[in-house]
Every structure is written in C-alpha cells, then in structure tokens.
Image (cartoon, helix red, strand yellow):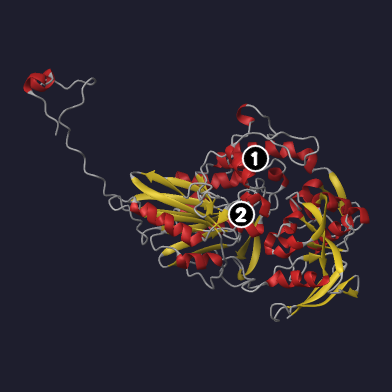
Amino acid sequence: MCTFPALLRPVWLIAGAAAPLVGYATPIAPTAPAASTEPVKVRLIAFNDFHGNLESTGLTLPWPDPAQRDKAIRLAAGGAAHLAGTIQALRAGAAHSIVISSGDAIGGTPLISALFLHESTVDVMNRIGVGIAIPGNHEFDAGKDELLRVMGGGCRINSADALTLSCPLGDTGANRHQGARFPHFVANVTTSDGKTLFPPSIVKTVAGVRIGFIGAVTKITPTIVVPSGVAGLRFGDEADAINTEAARLKAQGIQALVAVIHEGGDTGTPGLPLEWNDAGCPRPRGAIFDIANKLSPDIDVIFSAHTHQGYRCVVDGRPIMQATALGRGVSVADLVIDPKSGDVDRARTTHRNLPVFNERSDAKLRESIIVAEPEPFASALRSAKADTAVAERVAAYAQAAAPRAQRPVGRIGGAFERTAKSDASAGRLIADAQWLATRAAARGGAQFALMNPGGVRSDLRCAGNAAPPCTVTYGDVFTMQPFGNNLMVMTLSGAQVKQLLEDQQRPGRSGPLLLIPSSTLTYRWVAKAEYGQRVHGLRLAGAPLNPMADYRFAVNSFLAEGGDGFVLLREGRNRLGGELDIDALTALLKTSPAPDAVPRITWVE
C-alpha cells in the first residue's frame, strides 16, 4: 500500500475532505471486487473451402430426405450475403465470438472471384467479419508473392490483354483493394531462413482469458500447386508444427488451444446422405484423423478443411469438425472456459454444424431442419437474414464481371459431367481441346493430351435446365477452368508414359488419381493389381504404344511442373509452351461438341 509522509499528504487525506476527481491517484486503493468465478463463454464460428463462391446460384447441400433418411435431396444453400447473415445471427446470440476461415477462401473459384484476382473475395470476407484465417493449398495457386499481395492490399497494373482485372471497382478510396483486415497464421510453412511465412499462431484475449489458435496447411501442398510458386518454402508435418507451437503457448500460461488445419477426411457410408452432426463419427478415414491422433492432448478443438466433407466427430473428448465447403455451412463451437485456470471445460463445451440457408431454400425443408436443431442454434437459424450490404457489394462485382461473363463462346450438345469412376465427360472435353490445340507440328505435334481431374472445377451444362443444344458463356467456361494454365507439349518414351500412368496410384495411396486422356489414348486399369501392373492394353490411335519409341503429348503447366505428385513429367524433353487452357477449350466449343459417352480408361475390378 502506498503511504505519504505527514507533511506531504494531500489536504483531502488529512482533513477528511472529499477526494479530488482529477490530479491525484487515490493513495489508498479501495477494496478490489472479487474476481469473477463465472465461466467465460466464447463462440467460435468457422467455415472452410469457400473458393470465392460469392453468389448463391446453383449451390446446394445433399440433405437427408425427411421422408426417407437413406435418400438425399438437394437443399439450396450458400452465398456470401447469406453466410454473412448466418454468422451475424450466431454472433448476436453470444457475448463473445470469433469468426475463422479454415483455408481455401480463394483459388479454384467462379469468375466473380478469379476474374478480379480474388480481391473481390477478400473484400467480402472483410465485410462478413472474418477475424482470423489460415491459408489453404489454393491460397498458394498463384505463388507466395501473389498471396502476400492479395492479402496485403494494393492494385496490380492491368495489361490490355490480361484475362484478369485488378481493382475493378476503382483504385482509390474504399474501392481500392485494401487487403485482408484479418491476420493469417500457419505453423508448418517456413521460408528458407527457417522463419514461418505467417505467424504460427494467434492469441485472442476474451473477457480476461487467452485462447491460442494454431494453424497448419496440408503438407502435400507443394505437390498440388504449381511448384515454382512455392519454391523456397517448406511445408512441414502438421502435427509436429502444431505440437511445438502448443508447447510454446502453454509455457506462456495459455491453456485454451484451438487447432485450425487445412487437411481433412471423411466419415459415414459412401453414397448415403450427409450426416454431419453424428458425434459418434462412423467410419472415420483420411489424413485429419491421423493428424489428430498425433496432436497434443492440450488441443481442445480441431477445425479441419480441404476434403469438402461434413462431420462433427468427438475423439478423446474433443471435436473434429468440417462444414462441407463453398459457404454452404458453418461449424460452431461454444467454448466454456474457467476464468481462473484458463482451461476449456470440454464437458460443457457444445458444438454443431449448421447449414447456410439462402433465398432458394425450400421453406418446408428449412423449417424441418430448424425444428430438429437444439437451442440456441435453432433460434439463430430462424433469425438469420441475408446481409444487404454484403449482397450489394457482391452485386457490384457481378455487374463488373457481367460483360465478360455473359459473352457467348460456343454451344454444347449435352451436359458434360465431371464425376465418374474412371474418366468423366467434362475431363474428356478438356483433354480433347488441349490435344486439338497442340497437335499441329507448329504447336508441338502432340499425339495425345492428359488432364488432371482436380483442374476440372465444374460441370458444363445448359443454363436453367434448358434442352441441348444450348449456348455456353465465358463465365461458364471460366468456372469450369479458372486457373489460367498454359499448355505444354513435351516428349517421353513409351515406357515413361506407362510409368506415368502407373504412378496414378503410387504405393501408399488408397486409390488412383486418374489423369484424363484425350480420345487418342486408351487403356485398361486393373484396380486390384499391384503397383506397376495396373495399366494394360495401352494404345495410341488404336496401335500399341512402343516402350522404346518417343511420343509427344500435351499437359497443362501445373502438371508439367510435377503437380499432383506426377514428378516424372519434370523429365519431359523438348518442351514447347502453348496457349491458355481456357482458350483451347473455347476453340473446341465453337464446334458444338456433344459428350463422349465412351470412357478412354476401361476400369477392371
């Protein structure tokens, strides 16, 4: 306690006068109120794999049919304005809340994001109220430097022939690209000097308690983005990096720890409808569960991503959550924290995956879902309304994109699908377009083309369920192929081509990642055979491939650098670059192609 010598004591203290309002600090502190013993409640709201889906058009969730639970119906869901409204309703029901993006907010997006270098998505995420974020693998699609620019702010110079447009609403004031107003964090991405690219963690103080958020992105990122874009970066083991940072935070007295990991898995029975709130976690599988088993027991909650699946598992007393993708759902965890110890009371913490209803959601189905939800989540869903300010901002970007998006580029004779057991018709269309664009001698003399299935981002269909043939627009095509890869023609021997195809299921991979061939290349895939013995009957234009002969073929620049783990393509000789993949596709669409119903890969069990 502070005391004064008698001659120096303030007059008010000697005479018993009222204490002055200013000028002196009270020398004898009043009795401090007892520290609150009430638990601190913090609501965490996470969404993942948004992929720039600012508009709600065409977005649905496969939902169990209330009348037949083993059947799925399509629930219209998503859109940035509705995601913002759902988040606002959830925040209104909590004294303290934090909004988390779990990666892949950008990359692999519709035209409204990709056309504007994803500045539109970052702008809208600011308006949604994102508080913290981790990068996913798609944040690195355009390389480290562009990631730092789009998150840091500032306009790029727009060249006359560029596919994209920076700062489309203006380059001054509020319309200039401001960058992200929320920090990024990731513990397992380091630069050549050993420092992390972003901070490994973020610590938030809420009502006197500290919560540590530790981030990680899938360690296989260098194999699924253009390798040159992440040159000099190291993507370490996710669990090791998180555990190291968790120990550092705990040494600082931070007891409440949340892992945000851009890696995922799946649960349930394939082919059956989504059951994303089954805490029993039936049939868990995938990398996130392996990571979780290695994580420190000090981690209280795990938000995951990457696989676009919905699950809410409780493993060893802590939730592992993912809310599908594309802004169609959110994962909510209501933490209860002891104010004295700072520990999360896991027994009292509640969590739930919730859909993001939109203006097209069936009213009867919506109400049946809300009624089945526990409180306080049911009330939040019932009160959620689209955020009009976000809707207006999205509309401004849509208007800026419209002249290019709505430009007709060709016609199709039927629906091109991107899902199939072997090769799908959408992938066949793209592979054929790339072969046709490079088969001339002056353009490389390609004899076939191979397309990675992950680069086919959507089906190509007639708008509004119109009957084919129908017109398709640049926006349709850009949504299908948004990456802007150049074509690359190279040479490998017949033996190398066969090895490349055998590498579609390398040892340790549970299933194949089948490259989609153009019509000139066919073979049989024997699924149960051993590695190195699965490709049979490999033929080019009907003739067997000669292991000793050289062959010219086309791939996109992502694959040419060894993307998706096809490192053998780095050995390709006599390389010749070509046009953009989207230009090759639009050229083929001018011929009004119809879907090819015959697979080029014959699947043999």
x, y percent for residue 442 = 92, 53
| Residue type highlighted by circle 2 | Asn
x, y percent for residue 31 = 17, 37
Asked if residue 567 can be seen in this view, the reply is yes
**Callout count:** 2
Q: Residue at x 70, y 45 (%)?
A: 114
Instruction: Tell us which disc is closer to us: 2 or 1.
Output: 2
Question: Is 86 drawn above or below residue 15 in the view shown?
Answer: below
Please give the residue where the numbered disc 2 appears in the rendered image.
137
Q: Please report whichever mark, 2 or 1, sits nearer to the chain's N-terminal start.
A: 1
Residue 491's image quarter?
bottom right
Who is closer to the viewer here, 76 or 15? 15
| Residue type highlighted by circle 1 | Glu
Who is closer to the viewer here, 497 or 199? 497
Q: Residue at x 17, y 33 (%)?
A: 30
Please give the residue where the numbered disc 1 appears in the rendered image.
119
Element class at badge 2 = helix
x, y percent for residue 264 = 56, 62
x, y percent for residue 72 = 64, 66
Residue 397's image quarter?
top right
Q: Residue at x 71, y 48 (%)?
A: 110
Q: CA distance from mark 2 to mark 1?
A: 17 Å
